[in-house]
Image (cartoon, rainbow, N blue to C red):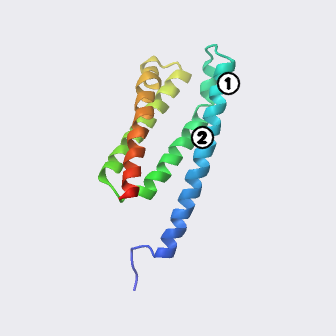
Amino acid sequence: MSSTKETAPHRATNETSIIKIGFWSSVAGFLTWSGMGVESILRPIQDNRREMFWPLPFICTVVAFTCLHLLQRDRSRFERVSWFAIAVGSALMLLGNIGLQLNIHSLEFLDAPLGPMIFLIEPCFYCSISKNSISN
């Protein structure tokens, strides 16, 4: 008798792995974002070479949000919609960063202000939805 549903121990193992990946991704994202922020304060001149390192904390943050999404996606329809908005904001910022590095003016506006506005505001909404789905 084969079942398409996961067994409870297998699901618990998967969730534990997702939690560990999400935790360490968020720690790595925090440390790299903080390092880039300190470097920007210590050297406040405009230097687009910093943007070469931007994908590292960005990817860590996106992985952390994706892990949270994987753990909570079944609890709320709004969670899925909100996570999709984070994914769109992330894609816009990535395209904008590529435009900045390759000097493609039509993509640079996505790097700032549009992408960061979505990417910074949307996680607040997403996390409040996730918190509410946990407490229910």
- Say what secondary structure mark 2 lies in: helix
Between 10 and 104, the one nearer to me in the picture: 10
The residue that disc 2 covers is 29
- Quarter of the image where one finds residue 116: top left
| Amino acid on which the number 2 mark rests in the picture | Gly
Is the residue marked by circle 2 packed among few (<14), some (14-19), or many (20+) residues within 10 Å? many
| Amino acid on which the number 1 mark rests in the picture | Glu
Taking the spot 66% from the left edge, 31% from the top edge, the residue there is 35
**Residue 115 percent location from the top left of the image:** 43, 29
Taking the spot 63% from the left edge, 24% from the top edge, the residue there is 50
Would you say 22 lies left or right of 79 here?
right
Q: Residue furthest left?
A: 77
Q: Which residue lies furthest to the top in this view?
A: 45
Evaluate whether residue 73 shows in this view.
no
The residue that disc 1 covers is 39
Is the C terminus in the top left, top right, bottom left or bottom right quadrant?
A: bottom left
Between 37 and 57, the one nearer to me in the picture: 37
- Quarter of the image where one finds residue 72: bottom left
Would you say 20 lies left or right of 123 here?
right
Q: Which of marks 2 and 1 is nearer the N terminus?
A: 2
